[in-house]
Amino acid sequence: MNDKPSYSDTNELSQFRRFEEALPIALLRTREAVMARFRPHLAQHGMTEQQWRVIRVVQQRPGIDATALSEACCILMPSLSRMLKALEGEKLLIREKVEGDMRRQLITLTQRGEAKFAEMVPQAEAIYAQIEAEFGATDMDKLIEQLQVLRRNLKTPSE
Amino acid sequence: MNDKPSYSDTNELSQFRRFEEALPIALLRTREAVMARFRPHLAQHGMTEQQWRVIRVVQQRPGIDATALSEACCILMPSLSRMLKALEGEKLLIREKVEGDMRRQLITLTQRGEAKFAEMVPQAEAIYAQIEAEFGATDMDKLIEQLQVLRRNLKTPSE
DNA sequence: TTGGGATAGATAACATGTTATCTAATTATC
DNA sequence: GATAATTAGATAACATGTTATCTATCCCAA
């Protein structure tokens, strides 16, 4: 019960499993396959995947600060810093200092940013719904939950 | 049955789900959590995650060509081109032209490359085994399989 | 109070991701 | 066998990922 002979992803026969079909690669490939569905839409609107993540989250949580945004978007601060500067330059969002803590900055979409969001979100949702329909909403929920379980598990090291 | 109230990942209460807990982010976060376990080991050996993927795959499939390597590692050709030049510079691998097709190049580890692999692989396997043990080997197999099912599903668009 | 640590962001430097384009070699078509 | 289409890699240009470090502010304890 230890040989799994089917390998449709790699085009040559392989005697290994632990490496190429291991969890990290599986997660990478799957994400790749999912994002492939979104990329044409993003490109049409001249937006990168990460920029769209930022816009989305700020739209949901206006006035979020950079640290929380970084966590929510899964984008590290150095990347986010650059992106915020650029997105502010394009007048899609604004950054404001906070009374009481001069280190923090609160981020909000401009009208232009809101418009961009409103323009893009319907098709983005449609693509997501399509994926969900193809894979099955139930299986997808299960998968997302399993991913979350694994994640939590890993965040609590064994010692 | 449509409200899932638990959100331990994002630190504030949220009224949405479709976005922040959607599949793409779930895959990203989970991969992040998994790789966090490997990063200290990789850093110790002065290697990036991607470089390690390349070394691993070439070790398994000596004489692989760049295109197949790109597919196997999930690294696009432009990135791979740069990396191969650098890794060749560090004398971890060599590239050889092929009789019969002067466009292709076959890639093989040098002795130094093999040594690096041999030096790193035991702990890498140990880390993987540890993750597997924490999450449960059975659940992990199931998860990997579900990821693969989703991937195949997505590669065959509905029309 | 003040001085030492902690926190929020920014920046530097380098590696990789992504799209578009380019070159050279190969294959298919006629 | 000449030409068009295809394929293997490389390069350019820009965006993001990653680690380390820096600055400014804030907080807290002596």
Image: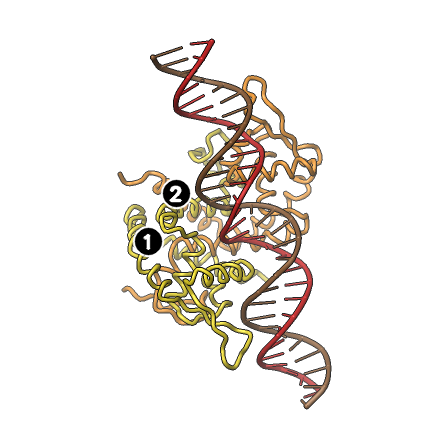
Chain colours: A orange, B yellow, C red, D brown
Among the 4 quarters of the image, the one containing residue A55: top right
**Residue placed at 30% from the left, 52% from the top?**
B123
Instruction: Name the quadrant containing residue B9.
Output: top left
Q: What residue type is labelled 1?
A: Ala
Q: Residue at x 39, y 54 (%)?
A: A23
Q: Nearer the viewer, residue A148 or B3?
A: A148
Foreground of the two, B157 or D22: D22
Q: Quadrant of residue A92?
A: top right
Q: Amino acid type of disc 2?
A: Arg
Q: Is mark 1 on a helix, strand or loop?
A: helix
Q: Are marks 2 and 1 on the same chain?
A: no
Q: Position of residue B56 (x, y in %)?
A: 38, 61
Image location (x, y in percent) of residue C2: 45, 13
Q: Is residue B81 above or below residue A144?
A: below
Residue topped by disc 2 = A151
Compared with residue A111, is residue B113 higher up or lower down, i.e. above or below?
below
Task: Using a 10 Å C-alpha cutoff, classify the residue at mark 1 as few (fewer than 14 neighbours), some (14 to 19) or many (20 or more).
Answer: some
Instruction: Report which residue position mark 1 lands on.
Output: B124
User: In the structure shown, which secondary structural element does the residue marked by tag 2 occupy?
Assistant: helix
**Residue B83 at x, y = what percent?**
49, 59
The reply to whether dot 2 and dot 1 touch (C-beta < 8 Å) is no
Crowding at label 2, few (<14), some or many (≥20) Cα neighbours within 10 Å? many
